[in-house]
Every structure is written in C-alpha cells, then in structure tokens.
Image (tube, grey):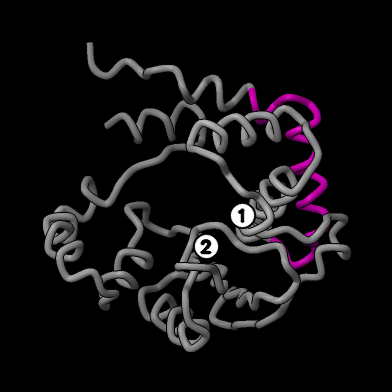
Amino acid sequence: MEAELSLAEHGFSATRAEHYLPELHALLDLRWEIMRRTALNVVEKIVSPVPGSRMMIGVTHRPFLESIPEALMNLGIEHALVYGAIEGSDEASLDGNSSLVRMRNGETEEFRVSPESVGLSRATRADIPWKSPEDETNRSLAALEGEAGPVGDLILYNAALRLWTATEDDVTSLAGCVERAREALSSGAAIRLLATLRQPIPVGG
C-alpha cells in the first residue's frame, strides 16, 4: 500500500520481493543456508510487480546477456536493459568494459559505453573505498547535492541509463539523458525528491 501511494504521489516507489513474491521470499533462509547461486537468483530479477515495466537487470555472467533478454521477451517485456555487473548488482559499472544489451520492441542491441563519450569519467565501485555504511550514505548524499567525483559520475550514469530505458523514442541519446540527470542534481531537484521520499506516507484514514 505504501509503495502504491508513493508511486501515485511522486512517480517513484521502492518495494521488496517479500511483498510481491512471498513464495520466493519464504525460501530466503534456505537460500542463505545453501550459500550458492541458483536459478532463483535470476528469477527474482525478471519478475516485476508492475505490468508493462521497463526493466534494468544486472547479471553476473556473459551468457545471461543473451538468455535474460530472451526470457524477458517471452514474458512480454518490450523495453529492458541488461548489463554485466559485479555480483549481479543493480548498479551498472562506468568502466567502459562492461557489455550492455538494450532490448526494444523485440530487437536487441549489444554495446559498450565509453564514459568520455557521455561526458563522464571512468569509475566503478572499486574506485570508491567505503569506510562504513555511514560513509557510503554521506558520500552519496554529497554527490546528490552536487559534489563532483566517482560517486556522482556513477549516480549520473545509472540515472541516465534508467531515463534512456524509459524513453519512448529512438532519437533520445544516452548522452542527452546524462545531461537530464546532471540538471536534476545541479538544480537540487534530486536531493529535494529524496527528502520528500524519506518522509513517512500516511496510510489509511
């Protein structure tokens, strides 16, 4: 309910698999006990609680760059971006070496992005030695407030990929989406939205 209200109010929400995939969530303790990747690690990525979703999916192994888009098409997903990421992270790497597969209207295209081509510097999580969860939070907030550096570049890149995946046309460029994301940071719109999202949403009466 809270996620639905946030989506209606802000056009943005976050939820967890326990809410829309309770059967899969019930296996979490067993999966932790096994301590090995299974098919469920893939299944949980390709299921969305929102019909007609446009999806971004990080995968661990190159063969998934072919099999995941095919699975998404079989599920009726028309727009998605599948990319290689460490440990299948939901964060795409800005190192210029990672492959991405864009899926639109039943067709796929594999490519790599040169960070310089979209006005960014090369950066990965390995370039950002977090000292603690608090340090990660503080540096992320500083980047959202406009501080330049690898954290900010990763935020801009991943935001731009999501904007690009969501576009309806074939004209909008990834570089253009980077500039849209940059404007959201420099104008303060991003940090203001975060402050709003951190406020509790009243549910019911």
Q: Which mark is residue 162?
A: 1
Whole-percent x and y of residue 89?
Answer: 48, 61
Residue at mark 2: 56
- Residue sitting at the far top: 205
Q: Quadrant of the C terminus?
A: top left
- Looking at the image, tell me whether mark 2 or mark 1 is earlier in sequence order: 2
Q: Image point 32% across, 53% down: which residue?
A: 49
Q: Is residue 93 above or below residue 18?
A: below
Q: Tell me the chief SS of the magenta region.
A: helix
At mark 2, the secondary structure is: strand
Residue in front for this viewpoint, 32 or 12: 32
Looking at numbered disc 1 in the image, what kind of residue is underneath it?
Arg
Q: Are marks 2 and 1 in contact (CB under 8 Å)?
A: yes
At mark 1, the secondary structure is: helix
In-image side of 85 versus 8 (left or right): right
In-image side of 99 versus 106 (left or right): right
In the rendered image, residue 177 lying in the magenta stretch gets the answer yes
